[in-house]
Image (cartoon, rainbow, N blue to C red):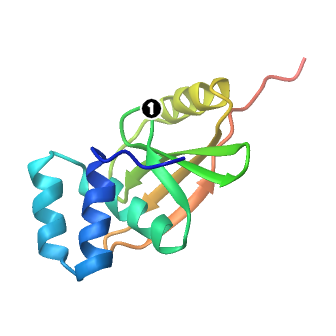
Amino acid sequence: MPESPSDPYEEAYALIKENGDWLGALNALEKRQADFVVFLVYYDLKRRGKRVRPGPRPRTLLLEDRPGKIAEILVLSEGTTVRPLEIAEWSRLAVSDSHDPVVAVVDESGGVTYYEARTVKELT
């Protein structure tokens, strides 16, 4: 899953990794109108050696956890109101794309917690 050279998150990550340039990374994200909270999750995953790229829907990333297994990560920040039905619909779409749905919540100090998110199926 190669990163696109036009990927603003990879550009910002490279500035930090190569030069420790957080200010340059923030400027690059702002210039490209990229979401800083999404970048925090991107950075967390890349720092752990994961293969990650922007996802197909707003506030999402794709993580190739192992060959043939792709997780779609919905990025939320602590204190942001999201309706449960929105998460359920996103999860349904992720599963329909053969992605494992994961929710990443970024807390006020920048820490990231990951949760598996599956749709509930009605029993008959």
Nearest the eye: 88 or 25: 25
Residue 3's place in the image compared with 24, above or below, is above
Which kind of residue does numbered mark 1 sit on?
Pro
Residue 60's place in the image compared with 115, above or below, is above
Q: Is residue 37 visible?
A: no
* Outermost residue, right side: 124
Q: Is residue 86 visible?
A: yes
- Give the residue at x 54% y 73%: 48
Q: Quadrant of residue 108?
A: bottom left
Where in the figure is residue 81, as x and y percent of width and height?
Answer: 35, 45
- Give the residue at x 25% y 62%: 12
- Give the residue at x 27% y 44%: 6
Q: Quadrant of residue 23?
A: bottom left
* Outermost residue, bottom side: 20
Image quarter hosting the C terminus: top right
Identify the residue position indicated by label 1 in the image.
56
Q: Is residue 30 left or right of residue 40?
A: left
Residue 28's place in the image compared with 109, above or below, is above
Q: Quadrant of residue 37?
A: bottom left
- Give the residue at x 51% y 36%: 87
Crowdedness near tag 1: few (<14), some (14–19) or many (≥20) residues, C-alpha within 10 Å: few
